[in-house]
Amino acid sequence: MELSRIVITGVGLTSPNGNSLSEFRQNLLDGVAGISRIEMRYMGEVLAGVCDFDPLRYQKKKEVRVGTRAGSISIYCAQEAVKDSGLDFENMSKDRVGIYVGITEHGNVETENEIYNISKFDYDTKYWTHHHNPRTVANNPAGETSLNLKITGPSYTIGAACAAGNMGLVHALQMLRLGEVDVAIAGGVSESIRSFGIFAGFKSQGALAEHEDPNKASRPFDLDRNGIVVSEGGALYTLERLEDAQARGAKIYGEIAGYHVNSDATDYVLPNPERQAQCMRAALKKAKMAASDIHIVNTHATATPMGDVQECRAIREVFADCPDTYVNNTKGFIGHSMGAAGALELAGNLPSFDDGMVHPSINVDKLDPECAIPNLVLNNPIKAKRVDAILNNSFGMLGINSALIIRRFSD
Amino acid sequence: MSKDECKQVVLDIIAEIAPDEELSDVKPDVALREQLDLDSMDFLDIVMELRKKHDIEVPESEYGQLVSLDRCAEYLTPKFNALV
């Protein structure tokens, strides 16, 4: 069976170092990180990636008050993506539009806030807000986006730990191929920096980064890396079948050439390089590509001691003898944006099809020898001979792995 | 507390829960929902804020008493004054 080709036609994003694709990209090429120190309930100061987009661009004040941060991020990204796509959105059938938003978690922020609120009233639950359930249902960010954009097609979230950003795109591709929708708004979002539990959990795990200079704290592959910087953010794309995009003369950012998702089935938190390698290989097979056809591998590496080494082991194996394949990482700039990570990090590399540049992994002062894989782009961008395909890794707890391949579009 | 002061308390709460609304010319004798973009969840917010900020309880069977500013003042002013 000949499957429809699925293309990216619009991008909307917010990251700790940019609120549009062009701003984000420029900062990745210029080495500009976006990490700051914030006050965290019960914990004092922590490092975090904070976004400064204006939610009131697309929402009323009351909608911001009643909704969630994840909802606001999702709405901002979706609106920006739709605008960027050039779709005649006003006049199209909204029941043929789907929203698929990847999330690592949802509801922690709102639940923690409410427990804090009733702690001021001797834990009397009559002070618990009636907004709690609509704020914490797992489909919240997608649902708020459907309300905001009046989209009546299927809208829901995809829970896949920190592989979720890729998973939103994978699911969108599947729904477009099944003919369930004509346009998909898909990617991932995260509001995790507002949950003390996420930070405290990483800290208890010995995996929360600390550095006197916030912008030096997230340092994948560096010998002195000491954990994750948690960030908020989002990236949503408009995806369409190729024939539909061409029929309306859409700008095409790239084509989803292949993908794969698998599970380690080995540990709650420790990754498994063998399964990661299998995941990348299976994505290449679906794309009918060789490893050497990939020109950028964007790593998931979060700057945990073990995670980075394991992923490098998998990449070294899959991309052995690939002299034109460069490897980079985005988390040094923006931290780990959790459910948004896969989608946001892909966006950081997409412009490489046009400018031929490969953004670096920053904050690598002493490269960990166990992470010294060939063509790792460190600290400064490089000009590639050509960039025709990007493989985007995104992995998550409980051993979920995803690899997404985006190819330069050509007829 | 006077009835006018009571109306101001209610308006202050509405200003928080419906920050997009223009409240300078709210007619006290007209139903709030007829002149402001308020839904049932917003009325629950008004009830919650009365509880949290002022220790005033409005039983569900009496929510209708909050229909307009005048009715709010009639219903709530004695409750405020009973607190002292």
Image (cartoon, rainbow, N blue to C red):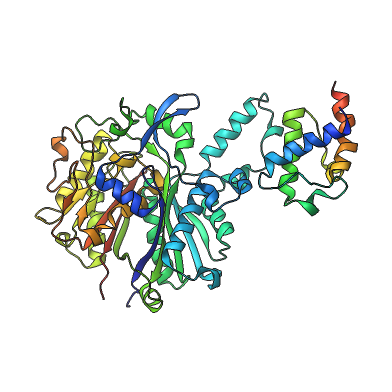
Report the residue at 56% width, 53% height from top: A144
Q: Is residue A403 left or right of residue A365?
A: right
The quarter in which the C terminus of chain B is drawn is: top right
Count of numbered circles on the image: 0
Picture quadrant of residue A398: top left
| B53 or A130, nearer to the observer | B53
Picture quadrant of residue B66: top right
Residue A159 visible in the picture: no
Please provide percent x and percent y for residue A282: 25, 60
Q: Is residue A47 left or right of residue A406?
A: right
Residue A54 visible in the picture: yes
Report the residue at 68% width, 32% height from top: A125
Report the residue at 60% width, 50% height from top: A60
Q: Residue furthest top?
A: B84
The quarter in which the N terminus of chain B is drawn is: top right
Q: A149 above or below B29?
A: below
Please provide percent x and percent y for residue A205: 36, 29
Please provide percent x and percent y for residue B41: 71, 47
Report the residue at 23% width, 58% height from top: A355
| A384 or B63, nearer to the observer | A384
